[in-house]
Image: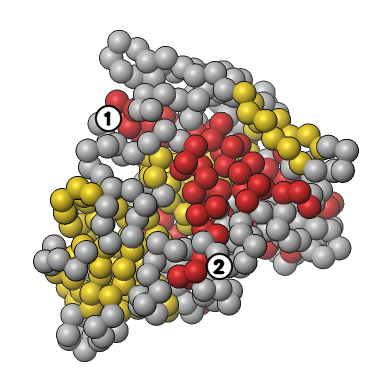
């Protein structure tokens, strides 16, 4: 599949059936490769619901996508937002039942040629929302490290994996063959050490977490294949805190899709900047080429956060990402059920505010709220707030249209 890209003539059509059910259909035309193996720029018009895609305001993503398709480098997409990014509601037990595997970032990875979701970033704030992380993401072994999930700490994606003096390992089994492991951890004075191995074999790397405050990355390699990655706290008495883990096969240049959702998060949670492992500095440190930023809009409109505050928070994130050559696409959330949550006029005001900021900041905008019809639909929703697997598939489809042709243009 490498070298194939879905062009912007792809359309996602949503329509309501006689019972008010929501459907989506996809029509795809596939581009061809040049003699040099590059996918030729397409730049076709996008359907309604997509705004300020100029064909030139995703330059870093366009460059990264072309390099990935040539087989030169991995490309990285970060999906940053609230519980509707994390995947709450994708399964019947909304914070368990391996729901993360059905989230829209995961489904986007599966729609993308050589896409991968073989990473985990914090606990997506699932534990603070009374969920069970190891049931929410079945790739994590249940006997793993506990979660340090104090929301006020502002850690990227909620809780850190807290390594205590114990024989218990933090274990992760990706769904694809891998040979490279990256572990992001908090370095600070007095912290302990951990080791990395696969399948209970020899230590591949030993990592000392003591030192000046920083968010650090340790890298280990192993023989290519399907593996269980084990992170083991050493016998010293000092704790360690792990923020993220990513693994990949270095022989295949992939599109890595990071699920950076945090349950219950609003726009204020994305601008915390007291420590290097807080969300704002951490998301820039892990260096995606593109961030699709949902900004916790559904929690902001339900909490009646002033629009000026929301705009300020989103602007801070956009500017921070742009400063490290990361492109941004703003994306609204699915409609919440009015009466249970904010009224539809209130929701519309927050969506309009996000759209206005997209033009002011020269970033694209995908209006998921409008594409869902601007009203809550039982067919696409698990509950009054969270989409179901079908709803998340729709969102993944819309996001796929935007990312697979970075030069595509919107009608306005």
Q: Is residue 110 left or right of residue 350?
A: left
Q: Nearer the viewer, residue 202 or 14?
A: 202
Task: Using the numbered discs, state the Cα–Cα distance from disc 2 to disc 1 in whole angstroms.
Answer: 36 Å
Q: Is residue 163 left or right of residue 375?
A: left
**Residue positioned 26% across, 57% down in the render:** 227
The figure's colour scheme reads secondary structure
**Residue positioned 59% across, 51% down in the render:** 294
* Residue 372 numbered tag: none
Q: Nearer the viewer, residue 272 or 165?
A: 165
Residue 288 in view: yes
Q: What is the crowding at mark 1: few (fewer than 14 residues within 10 Å), some, or many (at least 20)?
A: some
Q: Find disc 1 in the rendering and name its residue.
A: 71
Q: Nearer the viewer, residue 322 or 17?
A: 17
| Occupied quadrant, residue 285 | bottom left
x and y, in percent, of residue 139 in the image: 40, 62
**Residue positioned 31% across, 29% down in the render:** 67
x and y, in percent, of residue 103 in the image: 55, 53
Q: Find disc 2 in the rendering and name its residue.
A: 96
Instruction: Name the quarter where the N terminus is drawn.
Output: top left
Against 399, is 211 above or below?
below
| Occupied quadrant, residue 114 | top left
Instruction: Name the quarter where the C terminus is drawn.
Output: top right
x and y, in percent, of residue 86 in the image: 54, 58
């Amino acid at each position: 599949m490498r070298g194939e890209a879905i062009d912007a003539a792809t359309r996602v059509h949503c329509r309501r059936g006689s019972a008010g059910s929501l459907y989506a259909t996809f029509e795809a035309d596939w581009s061809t490769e040049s003699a040099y193996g590059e996918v030729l720029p397409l730049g076709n018009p996008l359907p309604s619901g997509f705004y300020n895609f100029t064909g030139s305001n995703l330059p870093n993503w366009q460059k990264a996508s072309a390099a990935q398709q040539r087989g030169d480098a991995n490309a990285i997409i970060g999906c940053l937002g609230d519980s509707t990014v994390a995947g709450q509601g994708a399964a019947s037990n909304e914070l368990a039942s391996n729901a993360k595997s059905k989230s829209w970032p995961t489904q986007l990875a599966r729609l993308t040629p050589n896409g991968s979701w073989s990473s985990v970033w914090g606990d997506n704030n699932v534990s603070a929302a009374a969920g069970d992380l190891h049931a929410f993401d079945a790739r994590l072994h249940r006997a793993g490290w506990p979660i340090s999930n104090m929301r006020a700490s502002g850690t990227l994606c909620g809780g850190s994996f807290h390594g205590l003096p114990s024989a218990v390992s933090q274990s992760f089994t990706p769904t694809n063959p891998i040979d490279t492991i990256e572990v992001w951890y908090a370095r600070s004075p007095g912290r302990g050490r951990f080791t990395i191995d696969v399948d209970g074999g020899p230590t591949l790397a030993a990592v000392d977490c003591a030192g000046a405050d920083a968010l650090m990355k340790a890298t280990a390699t192993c023989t290519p294949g399907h593996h269980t990655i084990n992170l083991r706290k050493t016998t010293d008495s000092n704790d360690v805190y792990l923020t993220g883990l990513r693994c990949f096969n270095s022989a295949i240049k992939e599109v890595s899709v990071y699920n950076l959702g945090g349950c219950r998060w609003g726009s204020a949670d994305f601008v915390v900047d007291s420590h290097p492992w807080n969300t704002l500095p951490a998301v820039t440190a892990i260096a995606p080429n593109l961030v699709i930023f949902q900004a916790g809009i559904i929690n902001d409109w339900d909490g009646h956060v002033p629009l000026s505050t929301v705009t300020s928070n989103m602007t801070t994130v956009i500017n921070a990402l742009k400063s490290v050559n990361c492109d941004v696409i703003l994306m609204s959330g699915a409609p919440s059920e009015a009466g249970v949550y904010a009224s539809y006029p209130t929701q519309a005001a927050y969506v309009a505010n996000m759209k206005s900021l997209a033009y002011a900041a020269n970033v694209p905008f995908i209006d998921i709220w409008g594409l869902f019809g601007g009203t809550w639909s039982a067919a696409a929703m698990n509950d009054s707030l969270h989409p179901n697997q079908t709803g998340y598939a729709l969102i993944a489809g819309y996001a796929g249209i935007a990312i697979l042709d970075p030069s595509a243009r919107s009608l306005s």
